[in-house]
Amino acid sequence: MDWRGPYVNMAAVQRRKSTMVEELRKMHLDHTKASGADLIMGVARFVGPRTVEIELRDGGTRTVSGDRLFLDLGSRAAIPELPGLTEAKPMTHVEALDLDCLPKHLIVLGGGYVGLELSQAFRRFGSEVTVLEEGPQLASREDPDIGAALKDLFVDEGIKVALNAKVRRVEGHSGNNVQVYFNAERGDLTIEGSDLLVATGRKANTDAIGLDKAGIQLDAHGYIKVNDRLETTVENVWAMGDCADSPQFTHVGSDDFSIVPRTLAVATAQRAIASSLSACSPTPSWRESGRMRSRRVATASSIGWRKYRWPKCFARKQSASRAA
C-alpha cells in the first residue's frame, strides 16, 4: 500500500508523453512513406546553389541537388551569455520535457510563452516555481493588461514572479543545487533552487550549414530573408516556419506550410499577416487576432475596438476543472 497520499508519478507522466510523441512520429513517417518522398536521415550542409552534402546517420555521405529547394530548419533555445550559466548546465524545454522526476524548486529564466507554460505545468505537478523576467511584465509581446492578469493568476497558484529581474551570475549545478544572483526593484537578490530552466528566447538553425555558399541571405538576427510568398533571395528557394522569422506558434507554421503549394499554383498567393496571430496555453489560455491593442490605439485611433475581460472567478473554475 502507498501511504504518501496524493502525489504525481512523474515516471508515468513521462511514459504517457513518450507514447504520445512516438505515435505522432509514426503518423508523420507513415505520411512521408505514403507520399513517395525519399527520407534521408543525416546532417546537411550547402556546398553550392541548391546543392547539399549530407553526413548520413548510418555513415558515409551523399550529395543531393534539386531545381527547387524548401527550407524548414526550425529553431532552438538560445542560452544567454551570463557568468556561470553554461557551467550550471541549465535545462531548456527539451530537457524539461524529458524529466522523470519532479524538481523540488524550479527557477525559470524568462516569462515568455515557453516559460509560462512550463512554469504552470511544474507548479501543478507539485514543484515550487520561481519565474525571473527581465522585462516589466510577463508575456512581453502582449498587452500590459494580459501580462498583469497572468501575473495575478500565477501568484494565485503559488508561483513566485520577479519582474525587471536582471540576472548577474549563476552558481551551482542544475539538478542538484543552483543559485541565481539578480538585480530587481528591491535591490540585489539571490534565489536558490534545485533546477534551472532557461526560456529566454530562440535562435534559428541557420548557422554553420553553409547558406552563404547557396547565396541565401540572412537578416541581422540570423533568420532567412523571405517575402510574403516565403521566397528567399535566391530563385526557386523557399523558407518557412521559425527559420523564416515567422512567429513561433504551431498554427503560424502550419499556415506557412500551406503557402508554398499555393504560391506554386497561384501567382497572388501569400502568407497571412503572421504578426497579427498569437496564442499561449497556460490555463486559462488566450488567443489574440490583430495588432496589440496598444499598437492599434497608437497607429489608428479612429478604428474602434472592444475588450472583454474574462471574470477571474470563472477562470479559476476553469483552471480547477482542467486540473481535475
Image (tube, rainbow, N blue to C red):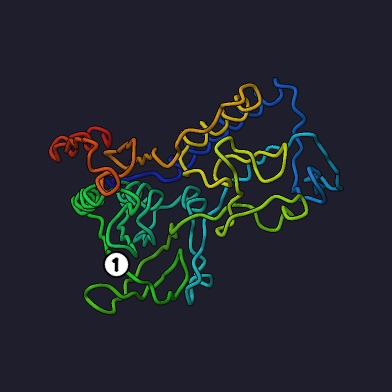
Furthest-front residue in this view: 302
Residue for badge 1? 164
Badge 1, how many Cα within 10 Å: few under 14, some, many 20+?
Answer: some
- x 13%, y 37%: residue: 311
Which quadrant is the C terminus positioned in?
top left
Find residue 322 and report its horizontal and vertical position in percent. 27, 34
Q: What element carries label 1?
A: loop
Q: Is residue 266 visible?
A: yes
Which quadrant is the N terminus positioned in?
top left
Find residue 63 and report its horizontal and vertical position in percent. 85, 43
Q: Quadrant of residue 65?
A: top right
- x 87%, y 48%: residue: 60
The residue type indicated by label 1 comes to Asn
In the foreground, 33 or 4? 33
In the foreground, 118 or 280? 280
Q: In which quarter of the image is residue 31?
A: top right
Find residue 242 and report its horizontal and vertical position in percent. 54, 45
Number of marks in picture: 1
Furthest-bottom residue in this view: 188
Q: In this view, does 39 lie to the left or right of 174?
A: right
Q: Is residue 311 left or right of residue 261?
A: left
